[in-house]
Image (tube, grey):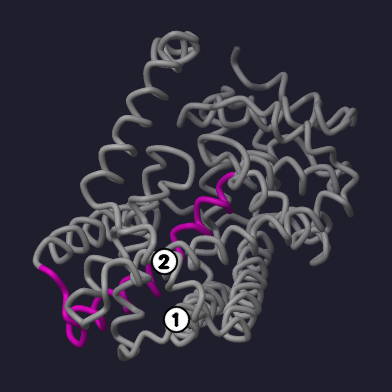
Amino acid sequence: MTAVSRIWGNGWIQAAVAVVALVVAATLFWWRGPEWGSVVDAFRFVIWSWIVLAFLLNVISTCCRAYSWRLTIGQALPDEHQPKVVHVFSAFGVGLLANAVVPGRLGELARVATLRRHLPDAPAGTSATLVGTVFAHRLFDLVPASLLVVWVLLTAEVPHWAVVSITIAAAVGFTLFTVAWLGAKRSARPVVSEGLGSIRQLVIMGRQGLSVLKAPVPLAGAVLLQCCGWALQLLAVYVTMLAFGIDAPLPAAGLVLVLMNIATIVPLWPGNIGLVQAAVALPLLNYGVPYATGFAFGLALQAIEIACGVGLGLVAIAREGISFAVLKRMREDDDSSENALEGVAEMLEELGETEHEAARESAAVPR
């Protein structure tokens, strides 16, 4: 356990951080909060059929992203240990729910642990490889996000403060993708490499999870599915605009989508509620949208996204036979590869995984 983990594990430290987060949130509401009466009025004129359509578009978008992860996994694991598509979708749904209800966005570990249960005969090192596929899959968002950013900067009315935020986020994303591409390992060897130290083995397995970055056809398919997912989400934002009677062009919806994603990169408090709505409402002022209407629109967008993740997640945990309490018991984890796999091993134990392969994986991690 690192010094950071020990400090963060202190209950007083966690309480202090929670208080600071609440103060920041309250200050934000006071500083940029709308007239709540006007927000309520905005909901009275909503066309709910458009909201339903936006929800369905989000569901289809999620399915595209889940199958993109399936293509990524297909390049990282041997043919004899390929998971079924339904298991991948189910694990992805569990991850969505975990991100919605557990602090720290641990949904990525939750989906790895859930999928690992369906691969009892896979050799040691599989969890590390799956963690690598999750990282690669997250990187694929950078392609459609970059295209969206360029389109928005060229066509939308972007405030100066938003230009700075978008530029910084794009630069960081490009750097991460470049590092991952250079570190990707395309290998036909078995999942486990004998004679290696545990830390080195974890690094190799994680790099193997990035194998799709060196496979042009599966890479193109995975990226295309991610692009489709983003395009559907863009349409969902635009449809929600129509529901609130917001007369703004499609580039305005693109600007909203970009700023929403930037506002949720770092979870300062649950859902970053308030910050997300401010990030949505402020740029819409340039399109003549009242702040209260833009704030209500931001609330609806976040509610649709949460409803999609929670709804699909509940279906997934019902299918997997996982109790909601298991997700609530997941502990926060730091960013090291070793501790990430410790988290997967602990979750496998919580989920009732007793296969000897899973035990060997957890034993291989330095404590």
Identity of the residue furthest to the front in this view: 37
* Magenta segment includes 156: yes
Which amino acid, by three-letter code, is at mark 2? Answer: Ala
How many residues crowd around disc 2 within 10 Å: few (fewer than 14), some, or many (20 or more)? Answer: many
**Mark carried by residue 223:** none
* Quadrant for the C terminus in the image: top right
Q: In the rendered structure, find residue 244 and report the number of the disc placed on it.
A: 1
How many residues crowd mark 1 within 10 Å: few (<14), some (14–19), many (20+)? many
Q: Circle 2 is placed at which residue position?
A: 296
Residue at screen point 44% across, 16% down: 15
Residue 167 placement (x, y as % from top left): 17, 62
Q: Looking at this view, is 253 or 67 the one in front?
A: 253
Up-down: is 28 above or below 290? above
Q: Which of the 4 quarters of the picture holds residue 225?
A: bottom right
Residue lying at 38% horizontally and 16% vertically, measured from the top left: 16
- Rendered location of residue 184, percent (x, y): 46, 54
Say whether marks 2 and 1 touch (CB < 8 Å). yes
Q: Amino acid at mark 1?
A: Phe
Magenta range is 131-159
Residue 154 in the image: state x and y as whole percent.
17, 85
Quarter occupied by residue 339: top right
Q: Is residue 328 left or right of residue 222?
A: right
Q: Determine the residue positioned at 89% across, 54% down.
A: 319
Front residue of 262 and 208:
262
Residue 218 image position (x, y, % from top left): 58, 74
